[in-house]
Image (spheres, rainbow, N blue to C red):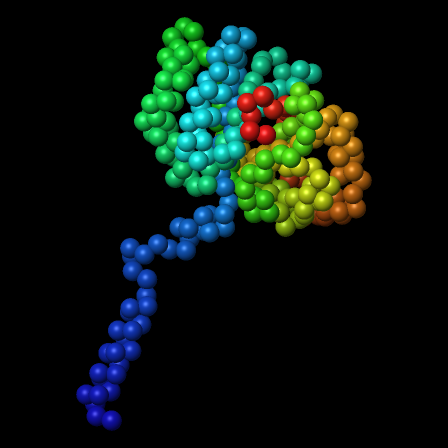
């Protein structure tokens, strides 16, 4: 083979290799990993009220304006919960759990609401409240990413009177990021999510908090028909051989430094 033909062959091979190499404008696998895995994001909004009047105004806003507007954006199901009467919290609160399929959907929410004429009209009393007559004391927002072992929100299937249901919201804090990741791993690879499913805890979500006031922490919600059912399920969990085994492993020690537990019930306008 002549030198010229060899050179031409080398050029052709080199050109083919270049054509197979991703350009800078092509999207890298890392940029789409969350969407590919199907893991949702959750926003938990907690409204705190000074009195019943504030709570009533916000209830009307959520039921008649906010939830319908989210559904027009195909954001659903939306959970709305209140503290059970026996709660020791001195302030009344309303919890709103919103699922998002992507961070873009979350980021674009407020701008889209500002362009929704029905939302602005239906929520006029709340949105136009005077500075000295606010519809709440404060609103706290926590943003989470779903766990790998339960990548999407699952509306609770429990039945019975809503006022009797127990929707148990838990927040587990860790002493640092390493322990926080370890506790998330305990739920996924360690088998806690699998055990909760086996024992029919009717979990709504498990979320790794990526923005909130108590980081590092994770949050999750399980649901029961009533208090007796809740107590029976947790006793079964504590007694389960799987829990005894995983909780005794050296690698999962000391990964929770503080626990907050909220006993809630769904409002009449909650989707589940």
Which residue is outermost to the bottom?
1
Residue 84 location, x and y as percent? 65, 19
Residue 262 location, x and y as percent? 64, 25
Judged left or right of residue 17, residue 32 is right
**Observer-nearest residue: 78 or 91?**
78
The answer to whether residue 258 of the structure is visible from this angle is no
Name above or below for residue 53 compared with residue 244: above
Residue 203 location, x and y as percent? 64, 37
Residue for point 44% across, 23% down = 66
Name above or below for residue 69 compared with residue 208: above
Residue for point 52% across, 13% down = 55
Residue 101 location, x and y as percent? 46, 41
Which residue is outermost to the left?
4
Residue for point 68% across, 30% down = 159
Quarter of the image where the N terminus is located: bottom left
Residue for point 46% across, 37% down = 100
The answer to whether residue 83 of the structure is visible from this angle is yes
Quarter of the image where the C terminus is located: top right
Judged left or right of residue 75, residue 23 is left
Judged left or right of residue 158, residue 228 is right
């Amino acid at each position: 083979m002549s030198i010229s033909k060899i050179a031409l062959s080398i050029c052709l091979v080199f050109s083919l290799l270049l054509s197979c190499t991703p350009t800078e404008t092509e999207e890298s696998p890392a940029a789409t990993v969350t969407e590919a895995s199907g893991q949702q994001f959750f926003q938990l909004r907690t409204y705190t009220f000074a009195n019943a009047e504030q709570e009533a105004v916000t209830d009307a806003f959520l039921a008649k304006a906010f939830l319908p507007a989210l559904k027009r954006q195909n954001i659903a199901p939306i959970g709305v919960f209140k503290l059970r009467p026996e709660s020791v919290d001195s302030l009344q609160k309303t919890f709103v759990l919103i699922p998002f399929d992507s961070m873009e959907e979350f980021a674009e929410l407020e701008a889209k609401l500002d362009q929704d004429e029905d939302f602005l009209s239906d929520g006029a009393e709340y949105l136009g409240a005077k500075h000295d007559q606010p519809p709440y004391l404060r609103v706290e927002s926590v943003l989470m990413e779903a766990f790998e072992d339960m990548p999407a929100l699952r509306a609770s299937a429990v039945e019975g009177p809503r006022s009797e249901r127990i929707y148990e919201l838990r927040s587990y804090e860790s002493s640092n990021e390493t322990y926080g990741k370890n506790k998330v791993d305990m739920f996924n690879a360690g088998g806690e999510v699998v055990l909760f499913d086996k024992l029919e805890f009717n979990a709504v979500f498990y979320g790794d908090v990526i923005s909130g006031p108590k980081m590092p922490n994770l949050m999750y919600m399980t649901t029961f028909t009533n208090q007796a059912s809740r107590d029976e399920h947790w006793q079964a969990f504590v007694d389960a051989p799987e829990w005894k085994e995983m909780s005794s492993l050296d690698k999962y020690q000391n990964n929770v430094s503080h626990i907050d537990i909220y006993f809630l019930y769904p409002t009449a306008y909650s989707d589940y």
